[in-house]
Amino acid sequence: MPQVVVDVVLKPEISDPQGQAVLGALGRLGHTQVTGVRQGKHFVLDVEGSLSRADLEQIAETLLANPVIEDVELHLPTD
Amino acid sequence: MRIGVITFPGSLDDVDAARAVRLAGAEPVALWHADHDLRDVDAVVLPGGFSYGDYLRAGAIAARAPLMQDVVDRARKGMPVLGICNGFQVLCEAGLLPGALTRNSHLHFRNRDQQLRIERADTAWTSSYGEGQTIVVPVKNGEGRYVAAPAELERLEGEGRVAVRYVGGNPNGSLRDIAGVTSEDGRVVGLMPHPEHAVEDLTGPSTDGLGFFTSVLKAVVSA
């Protein structure tokens, strides 16, 4: 069954306190070469039949992500 | 006057909200998120809680509930709607209010009595207060940090859309100390703090919260 992957990340201008907490923990573990962390969400959709790119964009932008604060990356099976 | 209180799976403060409605002198009407029936109410309160366990984003799934389509349609025609805490998150997710509520900047759940300043005393839900009046009601949230793009914030400030602001300390890192915003027509208000927990001396830090629920009585009569 074809799968579509949707990655959702906070827009660059929205601060990410969870990512900052992860960065702090990495620093305490000695991984000081990591200088930034942004935390996001990863959706894997099983798709039956045909679903257009426009349909997927609609799904991503009306439910999976909140366009006020988040950006979306679509990864179609042919990508 | 009939004021609906919507229960979603995971709502917590629907009973307190209904109690506040009754103490204000109106009839609370229980509404269920999955029904397409507003039961002839004159206004609606979206209560606090953790609808759908805050899955996906706080308020995101509740905002797509069947009853919310009716709420959005009626709100666009002027029905007063108050969203408290999770209800505020639902209103932003439903597109009735601008901006979004995100994880508190310090990552902690914050629970305390909070001072607020009423910035707009001419909305459907704040007319019982005076402009600039300071009140104290509880605040309790983990994802209460109000954000919007810089240009959007400027626009909201310019239009006087910030209805309530935190004073005496910002509990969650909200931009510009924003605790509540209103729609362009002043009929829809979203509020992170909990006025429904400050309506009786026995249980609240004050009775300052009652004014939100008495305000709407005048708003509906004058509509």
Image (cartoon, coloured by chain):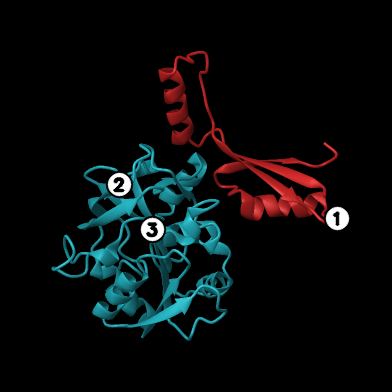
**Quarter where residue B123 is shown:** bottom left
* Residue B220 position in % (x across, y down): 38, 80
| Label of residue A50 in the image | 1
| Horizontal and vertical percent position of residue A70 | 58, 42
User: Alpha carbon of mark 3 to alpha carbon of mark 2: how far?
Assistant: 12 Å
Q: Are marks 1 and 2 in contact (CB under 8 Å)?
A: no
Query: Under tag 2, what secondary structure?
Result: strand
In the visual, does B70 lie left or right of A44? left
> What percent of the width, then of the height, locates residue B54?
48, 54
B113 sits to left or right of A28: left
**What's the distance in space between the residues labelled 1 and 3, CA to CA?**
39 Å
Q: Residues within 10 Å of mark 2 (few under 14, many from 20)?
A: some
**Residue type pointed to by label 2:** Arg
Q: In which quarter of the view is residue B17 placed?
A: bottom left
Chain of the residue displaying label 2: B
Residue B173 horizontal/vertical position (percent): 36, 40
> Looking at the image, is B146 positioned above or below residue B164?
above
Q: Is residue B128 visible?
A: no
Taking the view exactly as shown, the residue that stands out farthest to the left is B201
**Mark 3: amino acid:** Cys
Q: Which residue is mark 2?
A: B110
Front-most of residues A40 and A66? A40
In the picture of the structure, the residue carrying the numbered disc 3 is: B85
Display colour for chain B: cyan
Chain that is red in the image: A
Quadrant where the C terminus of chain B sits is: bottom left
Point 24% across, 70% down: residue: B210
Instruction: Work out whether residue B114 or residue B158 is closer to the camera in this orientation and state it.
Output: B114
Is residue B115 in sight in this rendering? yes
